[in-house]
Image (cartoon, coloured by chain):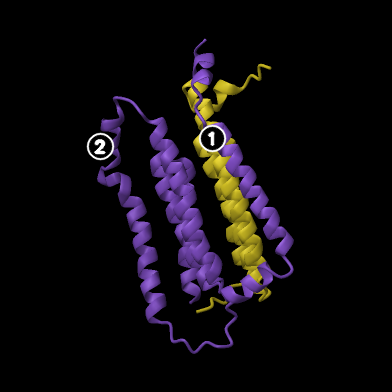
Amino acid sequence: MIANIPLQYGLGLAVMLFGLGLIGVLVRRNIVFILLSIEIMLNACGLAFVVVGSHLNQPDGQVMYFFILTMAAAEVAVGLGLVMQMYRKFNTLDTNAINRMKG
Amino acid sequence: MDIAFYICAAVAVISTAMTITSVNAVHALLYFIVSLLAVGVIFFVLGAPFVAALIIIINAGAIMVLFVFVIMMLNLGPHTKEQEKSWLKPRTWIGPAILTTILLVELIYTLTGYSGTSTEAAVVPAKQVGISLFGPYLLAVELASILLLAGLLGAYHLGRGSADGEEVNKQ
């Protein structure tokens, strides 16, 4: 049931997923894709916690993943509310449309 | 069981790459759900069944449904019907279907190969996680509940479309 994979491979997978999410945040200009990429990065962080937690045989990694999941849920709820506000005001999801802050 | 990890890692990386490169938001969501399922199987084979269930139920279930709702709400218009038709073309769902089929085969292989005799294997069960969660981490659980309450209020405030707000925007 338990895969005996080296710790480096699990952490390497987490780093690869985090890097893909970071590339998504930097490259994409659609705000929904930016939120998705932030989700990818949060998930990669949780994966790193769980990999180390299972390597050390401790439940703390899973506890940390629980907290990351809670934070991701709150972040997505607020972020999608902001997306809807942005679509109502500017009729676009392009982040270049909101590059000026008018007080 | 090591091979399960490597296959799942490959599926997760491929589907995540497809997520950030696809043009259509719904395609990206499909691929991201596949990525979450792959990471869930990785959690399972790493001996963390509690978070494996959690990622499927909350992340792939609840949070992604929120994304789908918002994308569907923003796509209101006369061109929605053609868009729906184009979403149901085979080349839309064939990629995620292949990747999830790999995961399904792997799941069946894992379940049939499970003998139940691996007692000394290092599964961290949900009971231990719960004891840790409500023992030393009790204050953090309370803080998480306060954070969820703040997120709920923020989402309600931002998502509420008040009538006078709409008129202000039209000026």
Q: Residue at the far front: name it.
A: B163
Q: Is residue B146 above or below residue B134?
A: above
Residue that badge 1 annotates: A81
Crowding near the residue tagged with mark 2, few <14, some 14–19, many ≥20 C-alpha atoms within 10 Å: few
x then y, percent, for residue B138: 71, 64
**Mark 1 in CB contact with mark 2 (< 8 angstroms):** no
| Callout 1: SS | helix
**Number of numbered labels in the structure image:** 2
Residue B114 lies in what quarter of the image? bottom left
- In whole angstroms, how far apart are the C-alphas of marks 1 and 2? 28 Å
Of residue B23 and residue A79, the one placed in the foreground of this image is: A79
From this view, report whether residue B140 is shown above or below residue B146.
Answer: below
- Using the image, determine if residue A51 lies above or below residue B71: below
Q: Residue B92 carries which label?
A: none
Residue B16 left/right relative to B131: left
The image position of residue A41, as x and y in percent, is 59, 49
Give me the residue at 38% from left, 36% from top.
Answer: B72
Q: Nearer the viewer, residue B25 or A73?
A: A73
Per the rendering, the colour in which chain B appears is purple
What amino acid type is highlighted by mark number 2? Answer: Lys
The outermost residue toward the top is B171
Residue B61: quadrant of the picture: bottom left
Kindly identify which chain the residue marked by label 2 belongs to: B
Color used for chain A?
yellow
Between circles 1 and 2, the one closer to the viewer is 1
A57 with respect to B109 (left or right): right
Q: Residues within 10 Å of mark 1 (few under 14, many from 20)?
A: many
What residue sits right under mark 2 in the picture? Answer: B85
Q: Residue at x 55, y 42 (%)?
A: A77
Disc 1 is attached to a residue of which chain?
A
Q: What residue type is labelled 1?
A: Gly
